[in-house]
Amino acid sequence: MMKFGAALILTALLGYAAWLYNDIVPWWSFAIGSLLVGWAVPQRGTWSWISGFLAIAVLWLWLISKMDAANNGLLTTKMVKLIPVGDSPYVLIALCCLIGGIVSGFAALTGSFLRKKQPARVSQ
């Protein structure tokens, strides 16, 4: 459980750092942080995926809600008209969080698999 919490916090912090530097790095750069945390924190694949998913999904929910409140929901209301996901901006926000969470979860899972794939050290 301690590894899960550490992976969750580290992934969220690296995702937040990627968001802070979004004018320099692409939107998907949070996945690199998720991959690194999945590789660095030894967990089973399932827990690695869940920690990556939850960290970014909750982070994006917080960030999107903060930005949405800053402009009184103007952007999400206009985006709902362009993207056919229903009439509610909350569906659009949930969809964005789901996409970010899935990308992060699979990046963390890939990092976990890469850790297991490393060749064993041969002592001489």
Image (tube, helix red, strand yellow):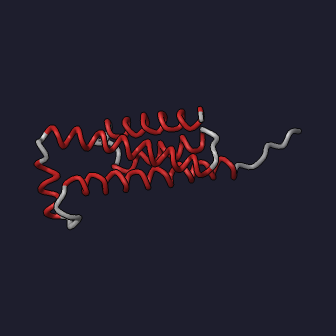
Q: Residue at x 34, y 51 (%)?
A: 97
Q: Decide which of 114, 59 is in the foreground and name it.
A: 59
Instruction: Name the side, left or right, on which 83 lies relative to 45.
Output: left
Q: How many marks?
A: 0
Image quadrant containing the N terminus: top right
Q: In the rendering, at what x and y percent does residue 100 appear? A: 38, 52
Q: Is residue 79 above or below residue 61?
A: below
Q: Residue at the spot x=49%, y=34% of the render?
A: 10
Residue sitting farthest toward the right: 124
Could you tell me residue 14's position as x and y percent? 43, 37
- Residue at 31% from the left image edge and 57% from the top image edge: 95
Which image quarter: residue 103? bottom left
90 lies above or below 71: below
| Quadrant in which residue 78 is drawn | bottom left
Q: Tell whether 58 sits left or right of 9.
A: left
Q: Position of residue 25 (x, y in %)?
A: 35, 44
Residue that protrudes farthest toward the bottom in the picture: 84
Question: Quadrant where the C terminus lies?
Answer: top right
The x and y percentages for residue 122 are 84, 43
Determine whether, in the image, residue 16 is placed left or right of residue 90: right
* Residue at horizontal 37 percent and vertical 42 percent from the top: 58
